[in-house]
Image (cartoon, helix red, strand yellow):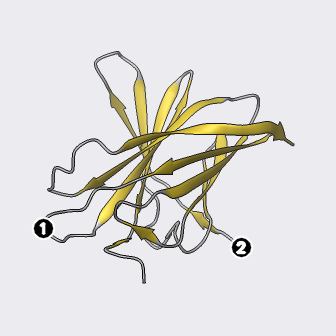
Amino acid sequence: MGITVSISILPLKNENKEYIVTALPDSACNAQEKICRVDSDKFSLEIVYDKNIFYLKPFSVSVWTENNDGFGVESISIDFKMKNMDMGINRFKLSKEGSPIRNKQKWKGNALLPVCVSGRADWFSELEVATKQKKYILAFPILVRQTAN
């Protein structure tokens, strides 16, 4: 059972004159605990991460997209960051899995995060959904643990 997330849309322009739309999910949605559903007028997403994420251990990210009116998602990538901390580039591309079923497409990828030397574990992820017309950025907090028990 997932949770529906309300979103705010903030249009921004980049140097290529494309519009980037940033959607900010409700912070109550934790993609490590439940499926987070995000609905826009063009598509819907369901996002889930592995429940336990540990430093230096691969973990999975799964996204299901459902397009409205032939609007197509072309690519999905995910970038992991910490606020006010340079953790380098931690960007991973998700791949389509199989053929769409009833207008739903599954995307999946694996990620691996470095250890923060300060001991912080307050990561967040930015999911970038690219279409021909726009890019959508959705931010989700994640909890990264030091070691597996």
SS state under label 1: loop
Q: Is residue 60 left or right of residue 41?
A: left
In this rendering, is residue 122 above or below 108?
Answer: below
The amino acid pointed to by label 2 is Met
The amino acid pointed to by label 1 is Ser
Residue 122 place in picture, x, y as percent: 28, 68
Please tell me whether mark 2 or mark 1 is closer to you in this view.
1
- Please indicate, yes or no, whether residue 42 appears anywhere in the rendered image: no
> Where, quadrant-wise, is the C terminus in this rendering?
bottom left
> Where, quadrant-wise, is the N terminus in this rendering?
bottom right
Front residue of this view, candidates 137 and 31: 31
Q: Do the residues labelled 2 and 1 touch (CB within 8 Å)?
A: no
**Residue found farthest to the top:** 16
For the point 12% across and 67% down, the residue is 118
**Residue found farthest to the right:** 102
Report the Cα–Cα distance between label 2 and label 1: 36 Å
**Residue found farthest to the bottom:** 149
Q: How many marks?
A: 2
Few, some or many residues within 10 Å of mark 1 (<14, 14–19, 20+): few
Residue 29 place in picture, x, y as percent: 50, 69
On the image, which quarter does residue 20 sit in?
top left
In this rendering, is residue 98 above or below 27?
Answer: above
For the point 50% across and 28% down, the residue is 134
Few, some or many residues within 10 Å of mark 2 (<14, 14–19, 20+): few
Mark identifier at residue 1: 2
Front residue of this view, candidates 14 and 77: 77
Mark identifier at residue 107: none
Residue 24 place in picture, x, y as percent: 42, 54
Q: In this view, does 56 lie to the left or right of 102?
A: left
In this rendering, is residue 131 above or below 85?
Answer: above
Does label 2 or label 1 sit earlier along the sequence? 2
Q: Mark 1 points at which residue?
A: 118
